[in-house]
Image (cartoon, helix red, strand yellow):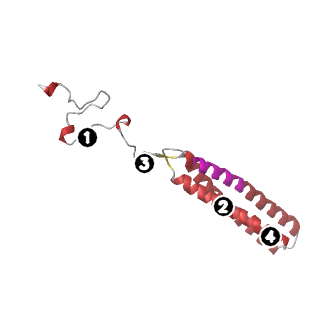
Amino acid sequence: MDQHYPPKTDLPGSPPESPLSGAGMQPETSPGYGYEENKRDYKHSGPGIASFVIALVTVIGYAIAFVYAGMQATTILSSSNDVINDSSQAIMMLGLAVIILVAVNIAGAVVGIIGLTLRRRKKVFAIIGTIINAIILLLFMLMIATVLVNAGA
C-alpha cells in the first residue's frame, strides 16, 4: 500500500531517490546535490602558463645576450683596431637586451601573480613561472647593487 507513495522521510526540496539506491548504487551527482568538484578536473590557468613561458623565454634570452656579449668581448680583445667603438656597441647591445628582458620579467611576474589569484584553476605553472621570474629579478637587483657598491669604492 505504501509502495506507490514516496517515503515519509522525503522532503519537498530533497533529491528524488533512484530505484537502485537501496542496492548500493549512488544517485547521479549534480552540482546542486552536494557534488564536490575534484581538483584534478580543473584547467591550468592561462596567465600561469603565460608566466611560465615568459620565464623560459627570458632565461633563453639572457643566455643568448651573454653569449653574444662574450663573443664580442673576445673579438674586441683579439683585435687592437677600433676597440672603443666596438666595445661601446657591444656594451650598448647587452645593456639594451638586459633592460628589455627585465621589463619582460616584470610582466611575467605580474601575470604569474594574476594566475595565482584565479579560483578553480591549477596553479602549478603560475607558481613555477612566478618563482623563476622573481629569482631572475632578484638576481638583476643583486647585480645592480653590486655594481653600485663597487662603483663607489
Whether pointer 2 and pointer 1 mark residues with C-beta atoms closer than 8 Å, the reply is no
**How many other residues sit within 10 Å of disc 3, few (<14), some (14-19) or many (≥20)?**
few
Which numbered disc flags the more N-terminal residue, 4 or 1? 1
Who's the residue at 14% across and 27% down the image? 3
Which residues, given as a range, are shown in magenta?
A: 101-115
Task: Please give the count of numbered marks on the rendered protein.
Answer: 4
**Image mark for residue 26:** 1
Provide residue 2's location: percent of width, then percent of height: 14, 26
**How many other residues sit within 10 Å of disc 1, few (<14), some (14-19) or many (≥20)?**
few
- Asked whether residue 42 is drawn in magenta, I would say no
**How many other residues sit within 10 Å of disc 4, few (<14), some (14-19) or many (≥20)?**
few
| Distance Cα–Cα, label 3 vs label 1 | 21 Å
**How many other residues sit within 10 Å of disc 2, few (<14), some (14-19) or many (≥20)?**
many
- In which quadrant is the C terminus drawn? bottom right
Q: Secondary structure at mark 3?
A: helix
Residue 21, by quadrant, is top left
| Distance Cα–Cα, label 3 vs label 2 | 31 Å
Query: What residue does disc 4 label?
Result: 149
Who's the residue at 28% across and 29% down the image? 11
The mark lying in front, picked from 2 and 4, is 4
> Foreground: 61 or 48?
48
Residue 68, by quadrant, is bottom right
Image-based side of 94 in relation to 129, left or right? right
- Tag 4: amino acid: Val
Query: What residue does disc 2 label?
Result: 136
Query: What residue does disc 3 label?
Result: 39
- Tag 2: amino acid: Ile
- Tag 1: amino acid: Gln
Q: Is residue 73 above or below residue 51?
A: below
| Distance Cα–Cα, label 2 vs label 1 | 52 Å
- Tag 3: amino acid: Lys
Which numbered disc flags the more N-terminal residue, 2 or 4? 2
